Amino acid sequence: MICDEIQQRAEVSAFFQHFDNAEELFASMNRVDLSLAMRIKMGDWFHVGKIIRVGADDDWIRDFMFNNMGEYFFERQKWDRAASYFTQSKNVEKLVVCSYLQEEYDELEKIIHAAAGNHELLANIGSMFCSVGMCSQAVLAFRSTSDMNPGIEACVLLKRWGSAFSLVTQHNRQQITVSVFP
């Protein structure tokens, strides 16, 4: 049970969807946290951004907000705006997808160098490069996963026989099974 009369009025205002009035009442109580919680619950990420600029300094809230703003633009196929928010929220997986959809292959290549150790992400980037015929970048991504078979498969798929042969001899592979052939 809420004992504070102003907070009761603010909660009633929020219930009846008078959110700005509720936010004013929370502000009169110096309860930015309650305004923030209300706006997060609503999914009003742009208002959350305004509140964070005013007072809250939690990094996880900021990252959560930027990620959700990125999702908002991603769902509307505004890849450039989504990418900027995913960069701010440090959501590399979604940033990779945005870069691929915008055909920003230089950005994808930069991510290869920054994503060392994330084998699943590097494999996805390698597949993306392979899908657009960029063999050397695909091999670079696959090489970073330390599993050369997908890199060799990419060379074969893209008919880069010299590169495939070079990789096979470099990595001492005796038998390569390529999944692209029946």
Image (spheres, helix red, strand yellow):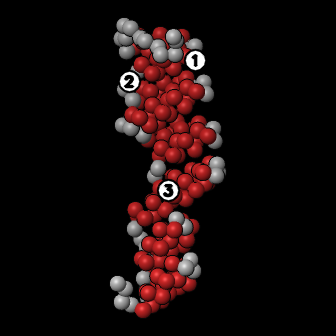
Q: Along the polypeptide, which appears first: circle 1 or circle 2?
A: 2
Task: Say above or below: 101 vs 47.
Answer: above
Nearer to the camera, 173 or 38: 38
Label 1 Cα neighbours within 10 Å, binned few <14 / some 14-19 / many ≥20? some
Q: Is residue 166 left or right of residue 171?
A: right
Which residue bears the numbered disc 1?
Answer: 158
Residue 35 % position (x, y): 47, 77
Which residue bears the numbered disc 2?
Answer: 147
Residue 84 visible in this rendered orientation of the protein:
no
Residue 24 % position (x, y): 53, 85
Name which residue type carries label 2: Asp
Q: Are the residues tagged 1 and 3 within 8 Å (C-beta)?
A: no
Residue 67 is tagged as: 3
Q: How many marks?
A: 3
Q: Along the polypeptide, which appears first: circle 2 or circle 3?
A: 3
Name the front one of labels 1 and 3: 3
